[in-house]
Amino acid sequence: MSLDVSTEANPVTDRGRMAPKDYDAILLASFGGPEGQDDVLPFLRNVTRGRGIPDERLEEVSHHYRAFGGISPINGQNRALKAALEAELAARGIDLPVLWGNRNWNPYLPQTLQGAYDAGHRRILMVTTSAYSSYSSCRQYREDIGVALTETGLDGKLEVDKVRQYFDHPGFVEPFLEGTTAGLAKVRQALATAGTPEAPVHVLFATHSIPTRDAEASGRSDDEPRRFEQDSAYVAQHLATGAEIIRRLEAADPAAGPLEWSLVYQSRSGAPHVPWLEPDINDALEELAEKKVGGVVVVPLGFVSDHMEVAWDLDTEAKETSERLGLAFDRVPTPGTHSKFVAGLVDLISERTVANHIADRPAVTSLGPWYDVCRPGCCANFRTQKPTIAGADTTVGTGADPYPDTAKAGA
């Protein structure tokens, strides 16, 4: 696959920048996940609340959690990320406590915000564990904060802003570049050991599938229309970031020749008649095997950490598919607590603070740096309406999960 994003992308103006502020705390916000077998059904009820899905149906889709003892890795990974952020902030002499709140499991966002207010905090900057632009990975976080402030009576008393989406920040991209370099070496070595050193290797950039209607709404705003690859900021951001990783790999090893790569999707859930982004990674693996590809390097480009959808959908299902097809397989690590990723998150924080301010906003693709303040109508959901924070309009969107019948969107 080849992609030229430089001529099609529209430059981001300074309209989306917020002036630096004196924040007094950082909020690490994430999806949440169960931490034991007894937590699985209550967690799935949280994820699917408001849709009346019976426990029998939820139990049917809980097998990936059950297979891991009912424990999603995401909470442990967030604890590690919180500690790493605290250490990096301290190393830079930045005196900001790091709080942690989840959308669907303890610690819940409303309780975290109430605790922050009770501790004397009044202005908080939020960092989420989602890098791309879409309803569920950006706007829904802002809506959930808006709802939490209303529910706790803190609206107007506690200010919460959010850092920009960081899909093309060097701190997010470079760990993937390192991992893909190592993954290619491993797969080529495996093919050499098997006696097929000339067999082609394909790089698969994997991300969460979402309904096509939500994909088309991502990045689309009322006052500043922009053109995106495949009419979707969500898709375009992944393609541009993947293309940059491939460009750097080819530049580092020109003798290896052009690399074949593609963007694939995983973790689809919901009603079969609703169109979602494709191709599914397992379908793509079938097609690559038919084309006599020898091995694949799977890069979980859409994910910040090795949570359940990485552990199950990639390390279990996609790996088993590859083994059945005779494909050499390596899955690249997510950024997790990689030092460059943690430093990059603190750089994003420093973009927004008065003290230790960083004016430069790096971006490795021509799509960024993304907005601090999302444009009116950006990443709209089409179901109900709830208020948001961080500058978005309050007339479109919902706090409800947009994926019907799903029990594994992001945990």
Image (spheres, helix red, strand yellow):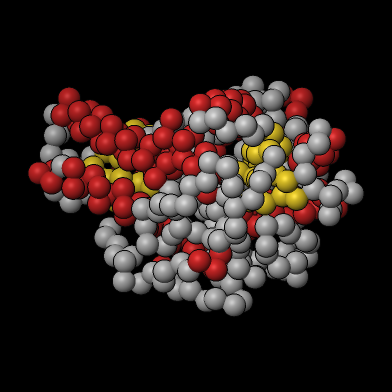
Q: Position of residue 347 (x, y in %)?
A: 49, 42
- What percent of the width, then of the height, locates residue 354? 59, 47
Q: Residue at x 18, y 51 (%)?
A: 258
* Quadrant position of the N terminus in the picture: bottom left
Between 112 and 331, the residue placed more toward the observer is 112
**Where residue 321 sits in the image (x, y, percent)?**
40, 38
Q: In this view, does 243 lie to the left or right of 409?
A: left
User: Residue at left 75%, top 33%?
Assistant: 107
Q: Nearer the viewer, residue 188 or 365?
A: 365
Of all residues, the one furthest to the front in this rendering is 355
Name the image quarter holding the C terminus.
Answer: top right
Percent of width and height locating residue 194:
18, 27
Is residue 120 shown above or below 403?
Answer: above
Please give the count of numbered marks on the rendered protein. 0
Q: Is residue 271 above or below residue 308?
A: below
**Residue closer to the observer: 177 or 409:** 177
- Seen as rendered, the residue at the extreme right is 153
> Does any portion of residue 263 appear in the rendered image?
no
The answer to whether 404 appears left or right of 17 in the picture is right
The residue shown at (84%, 54%) is 156
Looking at the image, residue 79 lies above or below residue 126: above
